Image: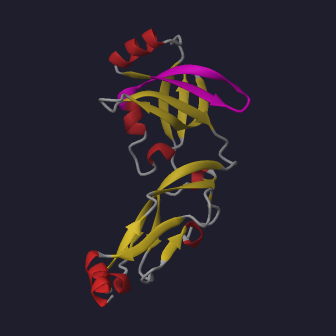
Amino acid sequence: MSQVTLNASTSRTPGSRTSRRLRSAGSIPGVVYGVGSEPLAVAVDAKEFRTAVSGDQGLNTLLELDADGRRFLVMAREIQRHPVRGTVAHVDFQIVDPTKPVVAEVALHIIGDAVEVRHADWEVDQQLFSLELRTRPDQIPTHIDVDISELRVGGTIRIADVVLPAGVEPVGDPATAVVATHAGRSAKAGAAATE
């Protein structure tokens, strides 16, 4: 996985007035934190930040944060958005060790065609759209494919059934449903008529 360099200023003073001024000037206030490091107040350029996290990895991108000469390997973690505009209002950068696992949220993509389910007039219902995974920062997948080709009527695909790359493990309850099936309108009507 490639790293993206992001410049940060450490000259900001904490406080809502300063944060408002930074946002109106096109910057995002933030904080850098991690094991063995005191929290450090920073500000990053909003456009640079958007560009840095707009690749395939999204918010799971490894960032080399250059904070006025001090370099940190970080990932964007807690992001606060403006309630109306949706713009990023604050971001927490977590310092990571490239050799130690982190927890990351990764999108789930449904692939394949559940032919048997479709032919029985049943429907496929995606229950989870992302999955929390534990792995090294350089092994975080861009997404996870969930193949529904073998799904049967009344069947369910659970977290434990999802095929993950080597070195990647799920964080959630293995019994949690990712994809389920249920009777469609015509199947329900047919069952009611039979009764």
In the image, is residue 43 part of the stretch drawn in magenta? yes
Going 52% across and 51% down the picture, which residue do you hit? 105
* Outermost residue to the right: 36
Pinpoint residue 119: horizontal percent, then vertical percent: 30, 86
Residue 64 image-quadrant placement? top right
- Magenta stretch mostly in which secondary structure? strand
Query: Which residue does the image show at 55% across and 25% down from the upper left?
Result: 31
> What is the quadrant of residue 74 in the picture?
top right
Q: Which image quarter is the C terminus in? A: bottom left
Residue most extreme to the front: 195
Question: Relative to 119, is 81 above or below?
Answer: above
Q: Which residue is at 65% across, 62% downward?
A: 167
Residue 18 sits above or below residue 30 on the image: above
Q: Can the viewer see residue 25?
A: no
Residue 49: within the magenta?
no
Q: Where is residue 147 in the image (x, y as percent from the top left)?
A: 44, 74
Residue at 62 percent of width and 56 percent of height:
171
Q: In this view of the protein, which residue sits in the foreground, 67 or 144?
A: 144
- The magenta segment is 29-47
